[in-house]
Amino acid sequence: MEEFAGDQISERLMSGDLDMGISYRPAIPHGLRFEPLYNEELKLIVASNHPLAKRKRLRMVELNGQRMTLLSPHFSTRQMLDECFEAAGARPQIVAELNAISPMIELVRRTDLCSIVSENALANEPGVKAIPLESPTPVRTPGLLWPPQSERPAASRFMAEIIRDIVRQGIA
């Protein structure tokens, strides 16, 4: 197993260097087959003492001018969030762009910044509050990516079944 950015996964699947990938639904599938595993709602996260921490829900437009840390623009999740901001007419103040979720959560915990992540990424992080977003609600779909050819190696089929079982257990 190796970790790559979504675009690299797609490129390596198309070149035959990978038999299977796990990624979010690609914006441009390039003939790849995508098997969705589940949908996950992204939520605003703030420190427990942040002024927004008392909110039960937040509309995307209310993030206009908010100081935020987000993933770098080359991530598909960030591109989707930018589309949500545009649809809502919100222009947050992006103070820090990072390429990993853990340091984003730590920045939120220790500063007045907020961010948007999946609730799965939080794993009961102390000192951080997750707030549902709406209008629009950012949702992403992780799944299995397969190259266009129909023949799948036995090892890839076996690994895919393990992943599906883990997802079913987590949802049940």
Image (cartoon, rainbow, N blue to C red):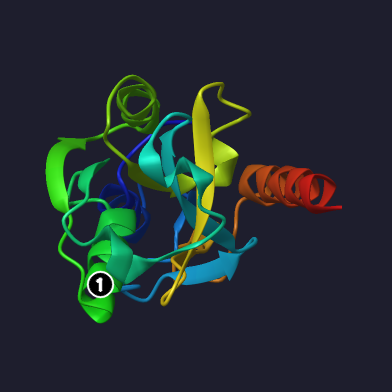
Give the image location of residue 48, x and y in percent: 48, 30
Q: Is residue 20 above or below residue 46?
A: below
Q: Residues within 10 Å of mark 1 (few under 14, many from 20)?
A: some
Judged left or right of residue 7, residue 43 is right
- The answer to which of 4 and 167 lies nearer the viewer is 167
**Which element type, helix, strand or loop, lies under badge 1?**
helix
- The answer to which of 142 and 103 lies nearer the viewer is 103
Q: Is residue 18 visible?
A: no
Give the image location of residue 164, x and y in percent: 73, 52
Give the image location of residue 74, x and y in percent: 18, 51
Judged left or right of residue 159, residue 134 is left
Which residue matches tag 1?
83
Judged left or right of residue 20, residue 26 is left
Q: Is residue 137 visible?
A: yes
Q: Is residue 106 above or below residue 164?
A: above
**Badge count:** 1
Q: Please report the residue visible at 79 percent of the width from the left and 53 percent of the height from the top.
A: 171
Quadrant in the rendering for residue 63: bottom left
> Going by the picture, which residue comes out furthest to the right?
172
Q: Please report the residue visible at 84 percent of the width from the left and 46 percent of the height from the top.
A: 169
Q: Is residue 155 above or below residue 79?
A: above
- The answer to which of 90 and 14 lies nearer the viewer is 90
- The answer to which of 51 and 140 lies nearer the viewer is 51
Give the image location of residue 78, x and y in percent: 27, 55
Q: Please report the residue visible at 33 percent of the width from the left and 51 percent of the height from the top.
A: 6
Q: Which amino acid is tagged 1? A: Glu
